[in-house]
Amino acid sequence: MTVASWSDMTKFSGWTKKQDIRLPFLKIIKYGFLFMTGLGGTQVFAGVFAFANTEGVDIITHPAGYQGSGGNLIVTVGISPASPHAAEMVTPIQNAVNTWNRLQPTITNLDNSIPRNQFDFESVALHELGHCIGLAHPNLASESGLTGINKNFTSTIPSTNNVFDINMGADGIIGSKDDMRGDDINLHWFRKKDNNPFVLDGVVDKTTYSRNLSDLPATHLFAANGDRDVAASLGVANTESVMQQGMFAGETRRTLSADDVATLSLGMSGLDMIAGTADDYTLTLRFEGFTDVADIVFNFDDMASFAACSMTGAYISPNHLHVNSGAHISFNTAFSWFFNNESSPLIPPEHTNPVVTILANDITDAVTLKQGELLSLAVMLNPGAHAGNQADYWVWAITPLGTFWLDAQLQFIHTVTAIRLFGGSMDKLSAFTIFNGSTNDLIPGTYTFTFAIDDNMDGVVDGTFKDSVAITIIP
C-alpha cells in the first residue's frame, strides 16, 4: 500500500489583516489514494494526522521506520546537494530539526521581526517537517476547497450531506469551542479535560486526548484548534500551532505549541496509544548535511507552487501507518525567502510551561531520615509563560496515617477533603519553605509529599503541573 500527499501555497504579497486574508499554507491536495489488497482507492484528506480520511478517521501516522516496537526512532534529514540556496538552508533546517527534537510546548511563538516582503524559510521548513513525520493541519485549510477565513474551522470531513457545516457560534471566533459543525466528522485530537490546544497534559495518550466529540467538556460544542484567534480568546497572545495552515509574509513561527507537541506525543504512545507501555517510542531527527538519500530531503526544485511535502506511507496495523523513507520537501525559488543564519538558542523560560519542584532537605530525589532528624520541605515555581495567570496551589502528603493537606497557615491537616494552600497569581517562587522541624512525631514509614499547581483557579484539584518527593523515616 502506498499513500501520496502534496502540499502547496498560493502566492501572496504585501500585508493585510488576518480577517481579510489568511495565506494558504502548505495545502495538501486530495489526489492521494490508499491501495491495499481487497480495498479500493480512498481519497486522502488532511487532519491532525496525515492520511486520516473517510475510510479511517482514527488513523494515526508515525514517522519513517516505526514498525510497532518501542525505543528511539531516528529519522534522517538532508539537503539535496544540487539545490539552489543549499548553503543558506543549513542553519534554519538544523534549527527546525532541533525544535522538533526538543518537543517543548511554547506560547508567544508568533513574531514579525523579518522583512515584511519575505517568507521565513525556517518557519515553513518546521511546518513541512511536521508533515513529513506524520502530522497534518488541525484546521480545514486549503485542501477543504473552502476559501478565506472559513479554512480556519477545525479539521473535519463532511458526513451524509457531503458539505462542510460551518458556523462560528456565539463567540464569533472560527475554530473555537462553540462552533456549530452540523454532522461534520471531527479529525482533531483534543485535550479531554478542557479542549485547550495551548495546554499540554501531563500524560498524552488516548486516555487524555480524543477526537470523539462525546469526550468534550460539558459546555463545549466542537474541538478547538490552534488558531491565533482561538489563542487570543483563551488569554494566550501571539500564539499559533506550527501545523496550523495560515501565515503572513514578514512573520516567523519557529517554536512549537502544545497542540503540535501533543499530536506527535500521541503518536509516540504507540499502537496501543497508552503512554508508558512497551510500544512507546521517542523520535530523533538527525541532520545529515548534503545528501539525496536521507529519509526526508529538502530541495529548491520548483516542483511546488510554494512549498510541499511529498510522501508515501504503509500500514503497520489497521489504524496505524508510518511514513516511508524518501519523503521530499520542495520549495519554489520564485519567492523572496528569508534565511535565518543564527542557531536557535534554548527556549527562554518565559515561553514555556510552568516548572514546579518540591525539595526535601534540598534534594529532589528520595530521602531517608532517622526518626528525630531534621526535615526541611521547600517548594519552587518557575511560572514560565504562565506568569500572572490565576491558579490553585496545593500541597498534600500521603503518609502511613493517611492523607494530610497543607492549609494557608502552613499546617498539615489530616483530612480526605482537599484543602487549597493558595489561590492567585502564578509567580516565581525560589525555595519557599513550607516545613522545617524535627521528625520526632513521624512514625516509621514512607511519606510522599506533592506540590501541584492547576492551570485555573476554581478550587478543584487538577494537579496540571506537579512534582513529588518521597521521605522514608526509619527508627
Image (cartoon, grey):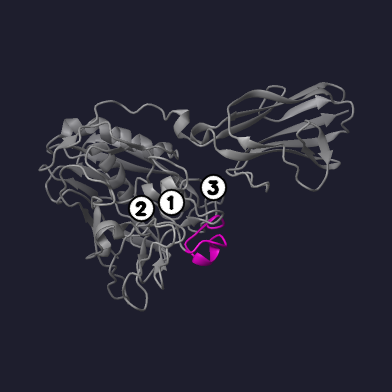
**In the depicted structure, whether residue 370 falls above or below residue 96:** above
- Marks 3 and 1, the one that precedes in the sequence: 3
- Magenta stretch in the rendered image: 206-221
- Residue of label 2: 135
In percent of width and height, residue 10 lies at 17, 52
For the residues marked 1 and 2, what is the alpha-carbon distance in whole angstroms?
Answer: 7 Å
Q: Which secondary structure dominates the residues rendered in magenta?
A: loop
Among the 4 quarters of the image, the one containing residue 428: top right
- Given residues 125 and 247, the one toward you in this image is 247
- Residue of label 3: 201
In percent of width and height, residue 444 lies at 86, 33
Give the residue drawn at x 38%, y 40%: 238
In percent of width and height, residue 283 lies at 41, 43
For the residues marked 3 and 1, what is the alpha-carbon distance in whole angstroms?
Answer: 11 Å
Quadrant in the picture for the N terminus: bottom left
**Residues at circles 1 and 2 in contact by the CB criterion of under 8 Å:** yes
Residue 308 is left or right of residue 333, and the answer is right
For the residues marked 2 and 3, what is the alpha-carbon distance in whole angstroms?
Answer: 19 Å
